[in-house]
Image: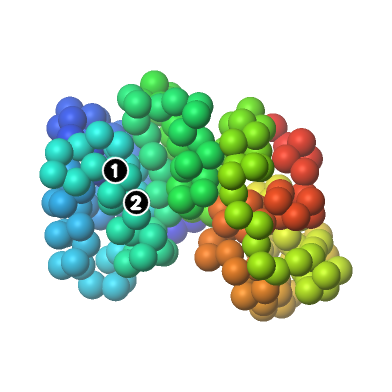
Amino acid sequence: MEKIQVAIADDDTLIVKLLTDFLISCGNYSITMTACNGMELLNKLKNLSGISIPDVLLLDLKMQEMNGIEVLQYLRTNYPSIKVIVISSYYQENFLGFMFKNEVCAFFPKGITPAQLKKVINSVYLNGYHFTLEQLKIIRDQISVRAPKPEFNTNELSSRETEIIKLICTQKTSREISEILYIAPKTVEGHKNKIFVKTGAKNVAGLVIYAVQNRIFEIDEIPKI
C-alpha cells in the first residue's frame, strides 16, 4: 500500500513528537505537516500544493487560537478530501452524534494504543470511516431524533445501488465490492458517484448516516471491529 499522507494538529508538542516518530517508524505513513493549533494548521494547508494535501488529519479538540471544532467546520467547506480522525483527552460518548453528523471519520480518546491507532488510520484511509459497533449504537440513539431526514428516498435508488450502499456500510473497498458483485471496479465507482448524487451525501460517513436513517442498513449488521 502506498504511504498514507498524515497531518497532526495538537497543542501538546510531546504528543506530536511521539506520534510523528511512531508513524514514521511504521514505514507506511508520511507526515505531511504538524501544527500546535488550528490556525497554524490552516496556514500551512494554504501554502501546500494540491498533491501535498494530507489524506488523513489527526486532530485534537482543545487548542489555542482555533480549536478542533472550528478547524473541522472549516475543513468541511474548504478541504473536504481530508479525512479527519479526532483523538482527544476530551473524548466523551455524548459527543459521538455530533462528530458523526459533522463528518468526522473516527473519534477516539488519547488512550488509544499504537496498534489501534494504526488500524484506525488504515481503515479511515481505505474505507472512509472507523467506528466501533458500540460507538455506532450510541450514534444511532443520538441522531435518530434530532437529525433532519434527507430529501431523497430509497425508491430513487436501484437494487444494485442499494446493494453497494450496504457493502460500503460494512467497510468494503471498491475492489472488494467488485469481487463480491462480479463487476469491474470502475463500474463500482460509477455506481458510487450516482449514489452520492442521489442521496446528497458528501462522503462515506454521510452515506452511512443516510443508510441508517432510511432503514437501508441496520447498525447491528456491522461486523465487530
Colour scheme in the image?
rainbow
Q: At x 29% / y 43%, what residue is drawn?
A: 68
- Tell me the quarter of the picture where residue 158 sits: bottom right
Which corner quadrant holds the C terminus?
Answer: top right
Q: Is residue 148 visible?
A: yes
Q: Is residue 123 visible?
A: no
> Which residue in the protein does label 1 denote?
68
Q: Badge 2 is on which residue?
A: 72
Left or right, 195 with respect to 202, comes to right
x, y percentage for residue 170? 71, 48
Q: Position of residue 9 (x, y in %)?
A: 24, 43
Identify the residue at image location x=18%, y=30%.
12
Q: Position of residue 66 (x, y in %)?
A: 19, 46
* Mark 2 surroundings within 10 Å by alpha-carbon count, few (fewer than 14), some (14 through 19), many (20 or more): many
Q: Looking at the picture, tell me which residue is in the foreground, 138 or 145.
A: 145
Image mark for residue 223 = none
Residue at the image point whose x is 40% and y is 27% from the top: 91
- Graded by Cα atoms within 10 Å as few (under 14), some (14 to 19) or many (20 or more), the crowding at tag 1 reads many
Using the image, determine if residue 198 lies above or below residue 96: below
Rendering coords of residue 131 (x, y %) = 57, 38
Q: Look at label 1 and name its amino acid.
A: Gly
Up/down of 146 relative to 162, above or below? above
